[in-house]
């Protein structure tokens, strides 16, 4: 009998927690503030990555699309129901809420003070900010961040797609958090 190398979709689904069960799975002390992301598909993908690395919460701000939306669900694949989220028209109000909970605020943006995400130490809980696909995070919101981080780029482009960057940052922060929790 041939044994398959890859696990089937049914196998993967069978080992996945239900929406009810996921409420009892501890979340990483990592949140995301999303400012003015135009693409509903990027927002759906951010939810999916956040679900994958166990984000505590997503703060959607400005004109960023919010659930429930069929087009968002198409990319999020239900993760918009497993990751807690909150909407704020004004991103500064979200920052007030985030900081009132004791979170450090990280700006994911190329700035004059930004350092590679791979060369920083972090204190948890924290929230990282991602922004618009063309203009990035606004100057106003950038000025409210405690630290500036960036993903090093080695090719001709200066940045990654916002949803891809969210996944890279989220999983790197999770790795750092898990390593610090073992110490």
Image (cartoon, rainbow, N blue to C red):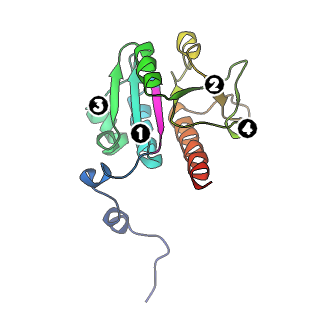
Instruction: Say if mark 4 contacts mark 2, CB within 8 Å.
Output: no
Tell me residue 152's x, y (percent): 71, 35
Q: Is residue 67 magenta?
A: no
The residues bearing labels 1 and 4 have C-alpha atoms spaced at a distance of 24 Å
- Asked if one can make out residue 38 in the rendered structure from this viewpoint, the answer is no
Quarter of the image holding residue 50?
A: top left
Q: Residue at x 60, y 44 (%)?
A: 172
Which residue position holds label 2?
147
User: What residue is shown at x 40% (from left), y 35% (from top)?
Assistant: 57
Q: Quadrant of the C terminus?
A: bottom right
Q: Return the x and y of residue 65 as percentages of the image width and height.
A: 35, 25
On the image, the x and y values in percent for residue 92 come to 45, 13
Q: Marks 3/2: CA distance?
A: 29 Å
In space, the residues marked 3 and 1 are separated at their CA atoms by 17 Å
For residue 109, above or below residue 28: above
Instruction: Find the distance from the CA under tag 4 to the CA under tag 3.
Output: 35 Å
Who comes first in sequence, dot 4 or dot 2?
Answer: 4
Q: Residue at label 4?
A: 119
Question: Which one is in front in this view, the residue at disc 4 or the one at disc 3?
Answer: 4
Write the start and end of the magenta stretch as one range: 28-33
In the rendered image, residue 32 lying in the magenta stretch gets the answer yes
Marked residue nearer the N-terminal end (2 or 1): 1
Which residue is denoted by mark 3 in the rendering? Answer: 67
The majority secondary structure of the magenta stretch comes to: strand
């Amino acid at each position: 009998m041939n044994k398959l190398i890859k696990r089937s979709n049914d196998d993967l689904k069978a080992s996945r927690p239900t929406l009810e069960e996921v409420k009892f799975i501890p979340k990483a002390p990592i949140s995301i503030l999303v400012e003015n992301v135009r693409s509903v598909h990027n927002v759906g993908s951010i939810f999916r990555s956040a679900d994958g690395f166990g984000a505590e919460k997503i703060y959607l701000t400005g004109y960023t699309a919010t659930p429930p939306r069929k087009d968002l669900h198409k990319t999020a694949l239900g993760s918009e129901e497993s990751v807690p989220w909150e909407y704020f028209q004004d991103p500064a109000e979200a920052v007030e809420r985030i900081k009132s909970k004791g979170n450090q605020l990280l700006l994911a943006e190329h700035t004059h003070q930004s350092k590679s995400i791979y060369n920083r130490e972090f204190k948890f809980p924290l929230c990282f900010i991602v922004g618009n696909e063309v203009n990035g995070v606004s100057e106003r919101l950038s000025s409210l961040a405690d630290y500036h981080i960036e993903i090093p780029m080695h090719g001709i482009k200066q940045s990654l797609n916002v949803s891809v960057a969210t996944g890279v940052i989220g999983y790197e922060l999770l790795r750092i958090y898990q390593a610090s929790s073992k110490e």
